[in-house]
């Protein structure tokens, strides 16, 4: 159940506020400007540990009190961070064993952030003590609206290979397997003389002469995600003790971070918050944004989520940090709202003068308020107020793209048929094709409830547990459509091959079996007899109940089937070129009755998403809002009717969207 920060009317608007970088007379200007911009929520204290606890056990909270009081007087609510993402220098000096260690055995030095081992007892104790102290001190403060635990868990220290981590890993393995016999079987240690006779012989998958046992690696990913989740839970518990009514969250990096199994994480949060930064040089960065937003919404189970950070303009950490074009920040922000965000926040409020992020854009730029960025910041605040009525409404999708962190970790382990296979790239292929078609997509775990989806797509779902296998079968039996891409259903949860021909788990369902895999050379493409092109992969594939939709015309398996279907269960054995995939998915969607939001595919560069409110009393029609965004440089028209909320005005059947423009239409009466 999502719990939203209370005391906020309408959508949340604000950002990370790190005023400890500035003399206090700047603070009063800050809150004046926040009011001007319509800011109603700021995240305070994310990196303040060294100031809050300047030496072990000595807390200095008076400045925080002054800050919270000031924000409260100004009507700005506070998302208070526990400040545990950056242990201060005194901590690292006193506990050098808490510094993280690389796979090669190098200790990392302090002087940055997230310099701690997730299994370090000293770190955990100190983090919980700080969170507890803050919670006890700030409980009941009227500005406190939400807790922000830590910051972007695993952004920099997802895996630590030190001895303390080794001990914790063994503890985790004992819980998972119970006895060594079971572990030896699961890890397949009969091969390469890896059999373990004593738990103490087991370590993290440190750098070894050659490939480390793959199941050991897979368990290491699982362990590392759980280990940081334990850190989160420990902080959350003390916060809940002191402030049971205040929601607790942390900021995820949806569709970006590989290290944490966010399906497990999302269940532990009172509300899903996520950060998103554009890959600035990518001309289709808005499509990637859509994927991240869809993922955030899916993690929230369809409930509203909070965009905790994005940027007003350039970031500082990419090779070339392109500034945003006029109007782009507005479009990015409203695109997140279109896809279910009920708040838009930035890193950070005021651009730093010093430190690593001084060239990262902010809401108040170095040049001050007579700037494009500030005008857009105040403009966006006003527009979010104008569309506040969308709060609490939901985006509904009829199509699910399967996404599983365990399958992602497993498919990208070493020693596979091709090192070119990237799970996220393949998901992105499908998501992009659907985006262009104007079909809204959820990301879904393969074992989750699929009953609301007409169609389910499984891009290279290499690892499939028995539960997921049964779930997908049920989906097809119930009349659902399923499309499976190559190298799916290959192994079980221990990374053991499902024998008898690939794609093991899905053989009967799809009515095919694969005799041998024929990955392609880098850059090589093959032709199909329906005019499509494939790359990356091909397979020697035999129909066994399925009909052949397209065959290979050339390449290593020329003449053999490439795309098949058994009723509603489709199989694609290569990576289709973007337009070919679009064509195929168009056909699959049409047959499955999955419709584009506007009835037909929108013009190129146009994005359309619908949010729906709850049922009205007495069977009143559900209100709905159509979000339309023009990412292109030419005006476009779309079918729509209702009241446009941003510019104001009736729309009567035909919405004209200028280049770069956004419209939010309250549909119907
Ligand atoms: C070498 C090794 C074998 C095996 C093969 C794989 O020849 O001796 O054990 O690993 O490589 O190609
Ligand atoms: C992340 C962090 C922020 C900041 C931004 C910069 O999202 O959470 O503290 O470093 O990146 O883009």
Image: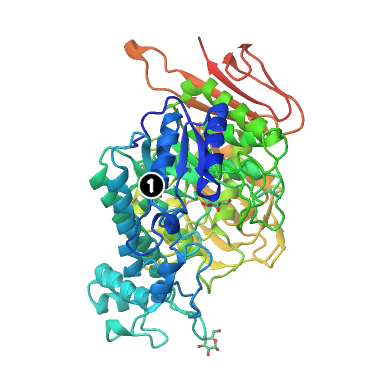
Residue at position x 69%, y 47% from top?
A: 530
Residue 92 horizontal side relative to residue 562, left or right: left
The quadrant of the rendering that contains the N terminus is top left
**Tag 1, which secondary structure?**
helix
Q: Residue at x 32, y 43 (%)?
A: 138
Looking at the picture, the colour scheme in use is rainbow
Expressed as whole percent of the image width and height from the top left, the position of residue 81 reads 41, 48
The structure residue drawn at horizontal position 49% and vertical position 23%, both measured from the top left corner, is 388
Image coords of residue 622 (percent x, y): 42, 18
Corner quadrant of residue 174: bottom left
Location of mark 1 (residue): 62
x and y percentages locating residue 598 in the rendered image: 59, 25
The x and y percentages for residue 180 are 26, 79
Residue 441 lies left or right of residue 123; in this view the side is right
Depth check, front residue: 323 or 197: 323
Q: Nearer the viewer, residue 641 or 47?
A: 47
Residue 585 visible in the shown view: yes
User: Please, which residue is most extreme toward the right here?
Assistant: 634
- Seen in the picture, residue 185 relative to 509 is either above or below; the reply is below
Q: Residues within 10 Å of mark 1 (few under 14, many from 20)?
A: few
State the residue in front, 604 or 323. Answer: 323
Q: Nearer the viewer, residue 587 or 258?
A: 258
- Is residue 475 left or right of 315 when viewed as pictured? left
């Amino acid at each position: 159940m999502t719990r939203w920060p209370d005391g906020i009317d309408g959508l949340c608007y604000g950002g990370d506020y790190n005023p400890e970088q500035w003399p206090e007379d700047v603070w009063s200007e800050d809150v004046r400007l926040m009011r001007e911009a319509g800011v109603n929520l700021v995240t305070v204290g994310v990196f303040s540990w060294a100031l809050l606890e300047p030496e072990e056990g000595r807390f200095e909270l008076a400045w925080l009190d002054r800050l919270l009081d000031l924000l409260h007087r100004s009507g700005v609510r506070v998302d208070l961070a526990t400040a545990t993402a950056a242990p201060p220098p005194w901590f690292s000096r006193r506990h050098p064993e808490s510094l993280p260690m690389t796979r090669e055995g190098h200790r990392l030095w302090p002087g940055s952030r997230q310099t701690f081992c997730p299994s370090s007892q000293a770190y955990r104790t100190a983090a919980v003590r700080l969170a507890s102290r803050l919670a006890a001190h700030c409980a009941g403060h009227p500005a406190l609206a939400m807790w922000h635990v830590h910051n972007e868990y695993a952004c920099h220290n997802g895996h630590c290979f030190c001895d303390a981590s080794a001990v914790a890993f063994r503890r985790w393995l004992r819980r998972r397997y119970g006895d060594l016999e079971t572990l030896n079987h699961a890890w397949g240690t009969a091969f390469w003389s890896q059999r373990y006779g004593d738990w103490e012989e087991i370590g993290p998958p440190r750098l070894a002469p050659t490939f480390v046992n793959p199941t050991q690696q897979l368990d290491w990913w699982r362990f590392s995600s759980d280990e940081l989740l334990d850190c989160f839970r420990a902080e959350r518990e003390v916060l809940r003790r002191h402030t049971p009514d205040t929601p607790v969250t942390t900021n995820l990096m949806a569709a970006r971070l590989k290290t944490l199994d966010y399906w497990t994480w999302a269940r532990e949060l009172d509300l899903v918050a996520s950060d998103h930064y554009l890959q600035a040089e990518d001309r289709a960065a808005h499509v990637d944004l859509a994927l991240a937003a869809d993922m955030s919404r899916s993690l929230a189970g369809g409930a509203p989520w909070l965009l905790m950070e994005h940027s007003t303009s350039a970031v500082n950490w990419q090779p070339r940090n392109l500034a945003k074009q006029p109007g782009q920040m507005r479009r990015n922000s409203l695109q997140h709202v279109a896809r279910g965000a009920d708040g838009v926040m930035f890193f950070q409020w005021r651009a730093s003068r010093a430190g690593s992020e001084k060239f990262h854009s902010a809401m108040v730029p170095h040049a001050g308020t007579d700037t494009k960025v500030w005008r857009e910041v105040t403009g966006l605040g006003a527009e979010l107020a104008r569309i506040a009525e969308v709060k609490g409404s939901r985006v509904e999708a009829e199509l699910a793209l399967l996404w599983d962190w365990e399958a992602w970790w497993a498919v990208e382990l070493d020693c596979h048929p091709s090192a070119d296979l990237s799970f996220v790239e393949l998901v992105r292929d499908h998501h992009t094709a659907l985006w262009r078609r104007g079909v809204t997509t959820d990301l879904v775990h393969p074992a989750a409830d699929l009953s609301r989806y007409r169609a389910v797509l499984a891009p290279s779902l290499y690892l499939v547990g028995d539960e997921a296998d049964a779930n997908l079968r049920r989906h097809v039996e119930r009349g659902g459509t399923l499309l499976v891409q190559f190298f799916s259903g290959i192994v079980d949860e221990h990374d053991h091959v499902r024998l008898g021909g690939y794609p093991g788990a899905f053989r009967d369902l799809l009515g095919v079996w694969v005799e041998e895999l024929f990955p392609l050379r880098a850059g090589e493409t093959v032709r199909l007899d329906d005019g499509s092109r494939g790359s990356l992969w091909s397979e020697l594939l035999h129909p066994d109940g399925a009909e052949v939709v397209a065959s290979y015309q050339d390449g290593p398996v020329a003449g053999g089937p490439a795309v098949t279907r058994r009723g509603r269960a489709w199989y694609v054995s290569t990576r289709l070129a973007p337009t070919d995939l679009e064509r195929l998915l168009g056909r699959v969607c049409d047959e499955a009755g999955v419709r584009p939001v506007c009835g037909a595919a929108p013009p190129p560069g146009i994005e359309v998403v619908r949010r729906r409110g709850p049922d009205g009393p007495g069977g009143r029609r559900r209100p709905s809002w159509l979000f339309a965004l023009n990412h292109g440089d030419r005006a476009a028209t779309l079918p729509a009717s209702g009241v446009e909320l941003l510019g104001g005005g009736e729309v009567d059947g035909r919405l004209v969207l200028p280049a770069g423009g956004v419209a939010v239409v309250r549909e119907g009466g």
